[in-house]
């Protein structure tokens, strides 16, 4: 009888835990699957963000559409390249990850402000983040193929 009660408590605990964390797991899974990587990097970033900022990040990822996903990916990129490892090889790696996921874009001022807000527990310096933005955008412009325009027979331009 005691075993039955203990088993019931364990089952209730497991089911309750899964129900309470399902939204966050779904949001993290959405981003990590799009980036074709394990959720470890996203979860590590969220652990370092702190509880409030982590909740804001999850709310961002829970929004429908590509824009929210792109902002989440750019925040992860900034965390990886500005906080964790600013090396050139890591820059190349993360740029390729975002290209494969079709989420690569130059970092806008709005994305820098968003990342600054979400990463506030790590006390980033805005001037340093702006310098990082310029470095990344220069790299992006240099390593992203530009669409070629070709003249069609009727004079319209195609890309």
Image (spheres, helix red, strand yellow):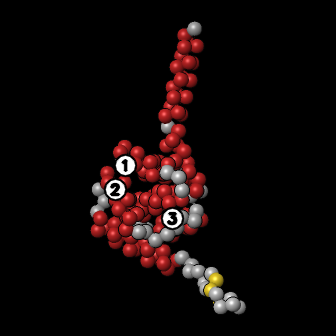
Q: Quadrant of the C terminus?
A: bottom right
Please name which of the two marks, 2 or 3, marks the residue nearer to the observer.
Answer: 2
Whether residues under marks 1 and 3 lie with C-beta atoms below 8 angstroms apart, the answer is no
Q: Quadrant of the N terminus?
A: top right
Disc 1 to disc 2, how far (Cα)? 8 Å
Dot 2, crowdedness within 10 Å: few (<14), some or many (≥20)? Answer: some
Compare marks 2 and 3 and give the one earlier in the sequence: 3
Compare marks 1 and 2 and give the one earlier in the sequence: 1
- Identify the residue under disc 2: 117
- Identify the residue under disc 1: 53
- Identify the residue under disc 3: 94
Whether residues under marks 1 and 2 lie with C-beta atoms below 8 angstroms apart, the answer is yes
In the rendered structure, the answer to whether residue 113 lies left or right of residue 2 reads: left
Disc 2 to disc 3, how far (Cα)? 21 Å
Which mark, residue 44? none
Residue 131 is situated, as x and y percent measured from the top left of the image, at 34, 72
């Amino acid at each position: 009888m005691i075993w039955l009660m203990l088993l019931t408590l364990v089952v209730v605990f497991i089911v309750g835990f899964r129900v309470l964390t399902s939204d966050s797991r779904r949001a993290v899974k959405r981003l990590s699957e799009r980036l074709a990587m394990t959720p470890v990097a996203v979860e590590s970033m969220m652990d370092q963000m702190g509880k409030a900022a982590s909740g804001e990040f999850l709310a961002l990822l829970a929004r429908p559409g590509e824009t929210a996903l792109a902002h989440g990916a750019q925040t992860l990129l900034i965390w990886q390249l500005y906080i964790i490892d600013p090396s050139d090889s890591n820059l190349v790696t993360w740029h390729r990850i975002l290209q494969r996921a079709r989420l690569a874009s130059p970092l806008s001022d709005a994305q820098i402000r968003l990342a600054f807000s979400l990463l506030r527990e790590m006390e980033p310096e805005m001037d340093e983040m702006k310098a990082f933005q310029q470095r990344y955008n220069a790299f992006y412009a240099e390593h992203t193929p530009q669409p070629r325009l070709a003249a069609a027979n009727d004079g319209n331009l195609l890309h």
